[in-house]
Amino acid sequence: MAIRANPLKALGIAACAAIATLGTASAVAGYNIWTGEYTFSRQELQDAVDKRFPATLRYGQLVDVQLTHPRLVLDDANNRVTTQVDARLSNTLLPAPPIDGTLSLSSGLRYDPAKRAVLLDNPAVEQVRVNGMPAQYGEQLNAIGAVVAQQILRDYPLYTFTPEQLRVAGKEVEPGAITVLPDGIKVQVNTR
């Protein structure tokens, strides 16, 4: 969205946008009046993902999966976000020691107008690594990873906009294209 105005008016609009941004409780997203984009830092996104963990799931009434220590990896080349988590698998029926490993779950991003939120979209298993697990169990581990991806990360909000953030210079705006950057994401806003 290009705003053509005198520099003093543009500074006033930028100040209003900055005040609206500072008044939000969910994060400190930055709005760039010149490019019409909100940007979110890697740390803001990591903080949002941290709120979802630790989590425990039961798979097939046989395996408990504990997920902890999420680490966000921004894949700007593929415009995706990867969440790596530590996983501990425990058999609920047999008295065996738990098995530790890591899960990498890759997600796209989309904006949901009803929720006013940037959501993780269509998460999928990228990689499952389990210490000491024979290769023949790879298919079962991927199935467990797929369940984890859908139950834990599907449609998970990384950022929720306030109504004030969706008004710029007295006009309503709506988030559009979302681009993953090496150090965060940017969300283009368009005038309605």
Image (cartoon, helix red, strand yellow):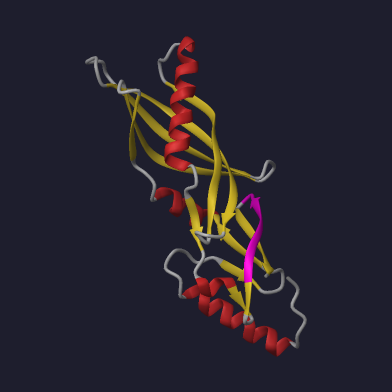
Quarter the N terminus occupies: bottom right
Taking the image as shown, residue 94 lies to the left or right of residue 169, namely left
Q: Quadrant of residue 96?
A: top left
Report the residue at 59% width, 75% height from top: 167
The image shows residue 170, relative to residue 180, as above or below, that is below
Residue lying farthest to the left in this orientation: 95
Residue depicted at 52% across the width and 79% down the height: 19
Residue at image position (47%, 36%) is: 150
Percent across and percent down for residue 75 are 63, 43
Magenta portion: prevailing SS class = strand
Residue 36 vertical placement versus 93 (above, below) = below
In reply to whether residue 176 is colored magenta, the answer given is: yes
Location of residue 148 by image quarter = top left
| Quadrant for the C terminus in the image | bottom right
**Is residue 186 rendered magenta in the image?**
no
Specify whether 67 is left or right of 8. Answer: left
**In the rendered view, would you say 35 is above or below 103?**
below
User: Residue 110: image x %, image y %?
Assistant: 59, 51
Region in magenta: 173-182
Residue 10 in the image, given as x and y percentages of width and height: 69, 84
Nearer-the-camera pick, 141 or 62: 62
Residue at the image position 49 percent from the left and 42 percent from the top: 154
- Please say if 45 is above or below 81: below
- Residue 73 locus on image (x, y percent): 55, 43
